[in-house]
Image (cartoon, rainbow, N blue to C red):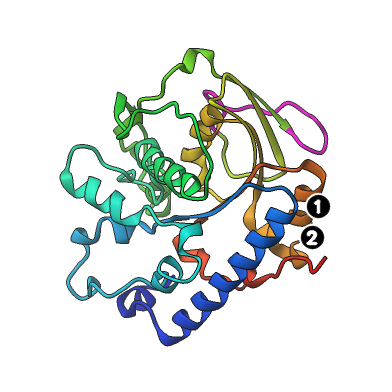
Amino acid sequence: MTVSAHRQGQSVDDSRLAAKISVNLLSWERWLHQQGVRGFALVIGPDKHRVYRQYLPDWVNQGRPPRISGLVNGVASRLVCDPGPELARQSQAGLYPTYYRSDTHWNLWGAAISVDLLRHTLEGQGLKLSWQMPDPVATGLINKRSGGDLAGFLRIPAPIEEPDPLPLVYNTNHIQSVIRDLNTNEVLHADGYGQLQFPRQIVHVVTKGAANPLKVLWLRDSFGIGQSPLFSAHFEETIQIHWGWALGDKAEKLVELVRDHRPDIVIMTIVERAVMSDLLLTPPPQN
């Protein structure tokens, strides 16, 4: 997303595209239900400037509705989880940052807030979920970490250390994930109980001690890094694939995974700057 697009906010073309995407999401929901899927949701990873608007210069910060407004408020709104307003509220309260100072992504605290909002979206569809986090979300330890992608983009040579607030998750000592390549069954390395980086292959995570005996097909991007240990804590099985790969080529890979693995829930986590994509217009199968 360019600076100009952010300043101008939602355009007429954005509204039209959002309306088409919303209708298509409802079509996918119907098809997924026919395959036995019980829950379907799109989680938007808000662009950092929408969460920390107060730090933008006046010429950028026009306060106009974001480009995704038509999607968040459209006919498929019950399927769309936009953590942006709550992340902004929590960030402005000043207790803990929800995004890394030196990174474009949310930290684990921000990711936990988004996962808790996803819970409400799924429960609004009739799912009854057990939960490993308190309500409202609370913090546990405050770790530290070195600079992220923004520090790299700016070629900052010295390490930037910043706080890394960790959400409180119950029973972590009993949560154990086995992470494999879905196609080769090769065991992959991961940190903690299932924290995974950008999915460069189809990843299969099976977690002993998860709160819910459910299988999730998760279409995600790098905003899933912070969410991934929390998915492991709450769902016994997740199959993870990049959303662009899953929806490309007429969504053949998505359809194949649904038909072969019969997930209970399908979730898409997509960064805001990419969510207004023609790929989300890919229709479901007609049979």
Q: Residue furthest front?
A: 126
Q: Is residue 189 above or below residue 13?
A: above
Position of residue 62 in the picture relative to residue 206 (left or right): left
Work out which residue is located at the far top of the displayed protein and give it.
Answer: 173
Q: Amino acid at mark 2?
A: Glu
Query: x%, y% of residue 285?
Result: 78, 66
Q: Secondary structure at mark 2?
A: helix
The magenta-colored residue range is 181-195
What residue is drawn where x is 50% and y is 75%? 18
Q: Quadrant of the C terminus?
A: bottom right
Q: Give the percent coordinates (x, y) of residue 269.
A: 53, 52
Q: Which residue is mark 1?
A: 256
Residue occupying image coordinates x 73% and y 66%:
284
Q: Nearer the viewer, residue 85 or 202?
A: 85
Picture coordinates of residue 146 (x, y %)? Answer: 37, 34
Q: Name the residue located 39 percent from the left edge and 71 percent from the top edge.
A: 69
Query: In percent of the image, x 59 and y 28: which residue is there?
Result: 190
CB atoms at circles 1 and 2 under 8 Å apart?
yes
Q: Quadrant of residue 202?
A: top right
Q: Nearer the viewer, residue 232 or 61?
A: 232
- Residue 252 is tagged as 2
Quadrant that contains the N terminus: bottom left
The answer to if 128 sits in the magenta stretch is no
- How many marks are shown on the rendered structure? 2
Of 114 and 225, nearer the camera is: 114
Label 2 crowding class (10 Å Cα cut-off): few <14, some 14-19, many 20+?
some
